[in-house]
Image (cartoon, coloured by chain):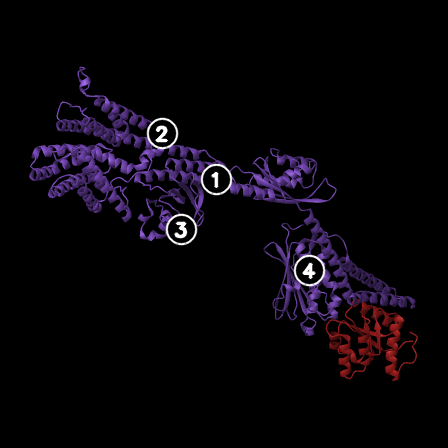
Chain colours: A red, B purple
Amino acid sequence: MIEGAATVVVVDDDLSVRRGLSRLLRSAGYGVETYSSAREFLDSGNYGRASCLVLDVRMPGQNGLDLHEVLTAAGHDTPVIFITGHGDITMAVRAMKAGAADFLAKPFDDTTFLKAVQQAIARVRVGEPPSASPDP
Amino acid sequence: MTGKDALEPRPREGKIASPLPQSTGRIVAAALLVSVAYYAGANVGFVFRFPPATPSILWPPNAILTATLLLSPVPRWWIYLLAALPAHLVAELGVPLPAPLVLALFATNCSEALVAAICVRYLSDAPARFDTLRRVAVFVGGAVLVAPFVSSFMDAAAVAALRGESYWIVWRTRFFSNALTELILVPAIVTVATARSSWVRGMSIRRRVEAAILALGFLTVGMVVVFAGPADSVSNIPGAPHTTRTLLLPFILWAAVRFGPGGTSLSLLATVLLAIWADTRGHGPFGTLPLTESVAALQIVLSVVAIPLICLAAVIEERRQANEVVAERLRFEELLTGLSSTFVHLHGHEVETAFEVSLRRLGEALALDRLTLYRISRDADEFLIGYSWSGPGVEPVPRATVSADFPWIMRQILREQPVAVVRPEELPAEAALDAETLRRRGIRSNLAIPLVAGGRLLGALAFVTLGAERAWPDDLVQRLRLVGEVFANALAQKEAEDALRASELMKSAILASLPSEIAVLDREGRIIAVNNGWQRSARENGGAPEAGVGVGASYLDIWRRAVGTGVPHAGAALAGIEAVLGRSETGFALEYPCAGSDVERWVALSVVPLNRPEGGAVVSHTDVSERKLAELEAQHSRQELAHFTRVSTMGELAASLAHELNQPLTGILSNAQAAQRFLEATPPDLGEVRDILTDIVDDDKRAAEVIQRLRYLLKKDEAQFLWIDLNVLIRDVVKLLSSDAVIRNVTVRLELDPRPVMVSGDGVQLRQVILNLLLNAMEAMAECAENDRIIVVRTETSEVEAVHVSVRDAGTGLGQDTHQLVFEPFYTTKPAGMGMGLAIAKSIIEAHGGVIWADSSTRGATFHFALPAPDERPV
């Protein structure tokens, strides 16, 4: 089941993580844009086209949570999935409160990841909370 | 005669010796004595007065007065003359003479005594002595001839005028009788009065026996003379003496030759008395003549004989005294030579005895009561009794403070001036304390002589008499100063020897007390001396290669043998010792484990050159096993602690390390699963899969590196010193901390020397230092604004053969006075910190022979460490 033109943006400082996630998303049929830092993403100005943002929490410079706050403040309600190497509950709570679609601890399974992306995009499209997970 | 006689105190020359008492009571007693003597003398004279002639043929009163005036000071003459007046009056009462004549006779008597006394006093150098020809000549001229000659004119005039006797007969009778009495009585009286008991006491036994024989012989012959009958009985023998009386002549000569003018005078007196006695019995020498004529003839004969006899006695006495002076000088020279030679060849304890003996000999020779050698104290403000001799029955010298008791004398001695005191009263007014002390101690005469050697005052000699007064003539003082020089030199030599011995004793005591084994080597490396420790060790460790050797063995050979048997450190030791012996090195030290015993033993070898022209060295072996074991123990503990802190540091870093590992793991998992998806697609995208596999391999390597870096830190090996490039090491640790830095929002900037920064060290430990410094820097900036969180790590190889590493943070810096404190164990400002990080870093850097320090400013703190750079960079 292909969602067509849905584009997912991945912001992570680690190259191999970016490439691995990019390949997973492409194998599932998504369009993918990757950025190595929040600054690079903001500078690209492409955040308006994204259907879903995958943000690393810990990054040199501005971190994922801050970036999310900036985007929210700017009126962008693109669904966001946070990924982090630290399973930090405090951060997870903060992220969810700020309206994050999901919060994943590295490393994670492909199905978990793709399901989270799919549900985030679907919730925006349907305008209601996701009820079932699409078969990737 | 003994030496004692020669140096017996005498009244001083040129001064009136006054054996007559000084106090009023005694003057009165003396005046009474004069009075009684005068009276007695007058009565003796009356016996020999043969009326109608007024003058007596023997008139002692005038001689008694003359002797009195010679013995007493001029100002008291009138007392004694006045004392004689009542005696004169009383004596003359029994004689029917007119009163004016009695007074006139007293006047002429006094005038004779006065003329005699004045003549002798002003012409003789010693009026009361008759022991030189000059003195006797003055006496004979003044007292025997002039005085009777002059006074007899007045006497004859008075007698002729008042009694109508023949002027010339009176003059002649009086002149001869008075001349004779002056001649034989005055020396006898004066000799007995001045010599008193000491004249007899001073004699040796032999002289006393001789005097007794003389007196006995004299008396025997005298009896023969008196009772042998008229002279005529022998006078018909041709050439025989006219009278038995001439038999006395040998005895008078004997007395003159052997007993001086005093003895002569006494024997003459006895002769006169005997002769007159004989004459009055009618046995006179000139028995056929009338008595007066006979007496006059006797007077003339006696006077003619007596004058040359007394002169002869004086000459002999003078010669004897001169001989005595020479002999006494000789004895003193001998004494001095003896003392000098005594001290020349003495050593150590013998000197003490020599001082005692010398003081005794000198004290006895000088007839002293006490002789004390004082030594000056170190700070020259006190004299301490060094040696002292006291005569028999004399108390030892009191232990008292010289500076308090004899301040004036001590000042003179400090100025190196001798002080001679004949009697305490003679001391000047400023020496009142000294005089008082002398009196209190019963000291009569005292001579203090400074002891000076090599221009240094060492002490003083104090010559003391208690009862008897003692003169200190200049020549005696000069000679005693020579004695002082001998003592001073001996003292100086003894002090020098004492100092040397003390120094040597101290050195050997120090050497003996050292626990180390010490040996002294000559230039060739032979052992020339060892201490107790060495001997002990030689006994105990007979088998050890560097022990069990005594004096005479070659120390170098021992090490040469050790080199031969392959002892590991022997080559280095041998080279070091040879370098010191050859003076190319100023010292050598080596610590080595000692083989051949069950327990591990460490020895510190130290070689120091001997600072002397002949060269040589001092070798010491010190057992440093305990220290060495403690060091190893400490090193082990430090490593344990370091390891423990590394492990705990890892615990703190766990989260960031997890992140560090999660990144490659995440990459690997997502790539692998993507690959599965690409393979399931049709057609499978093999190109993508190939790229994925490459990425997976890289990620895996990355994860392995993280693990490896962790391993480096967590290794628990013995320290291993290797050549390490600090730049590589720092990059490694910074990578390990990179995720932590990300989490803490800290940027680590490296400003590393472009060349490798090589040190010799243990990689694990040095990693820990850098890790601790970086963690410390990160934590220091927890409160900073995120943009400011920058750490700068610099390395450089400095000019001074050291490498320098600094880690600068931008935190709040260090508080004042905490620059040293931060390196103390358990010092921490962080709530969760253990306070061991920097302390561990410090101990590791110091174990590497480096230093670590901190400085700070408002822009943060910088921690530095420097490690010795290798002399040669490894290729």
Checking the image for residue B497, the label placed there is 1
- Residue B762 in the image: x percent, y percent? 71, 54
Badges 4 and 3, same chain: yes
The answer to whether residue B48 is above or below residue B646 is above
Note whether residue B348 is visible: no
Checking the image for residue B559, the label placed there is none
In the image, what residue type sits under mark 4? Ala
Q: CA distance from mark 4 to mark 3?
A: 73 Å
Badges 2 and 4, same chain: yes
Which of disc 1 and disc 2 is earlier in sequence?
A: 2
In the image, what residue type sits under mark 2? Ile
Which residue is under mark 4? B841
Which residue is under mark 2? B205
Which of disc 3 and disc 4 is earlier in sequence?
A: 3
Checking the image for residue B405, the label placed there is 3
Q: How many marks?
A: 4
Q: CA distance from mark 2 to mark 1?
A: 47 Å
Q: CA distance from mark 2 to mark 3?
A: 42 Å
Query: Is there CB contact under 8 Å for labels 4 and 1?
Result: no
Which residue: 8% across, 33% down?
B168
Q: Nearer the viewer, mark 1 or mark 3?
A: 3
Label 2 lies in what chain? B
In the image, what residue type sits under mark 1? Glu
Residue B273 sits in which quadrant? top left
Q: Nearer the viewer, mark 2 or mark 4?
A: 2
Which residue: 87% across, 83% down?
A125
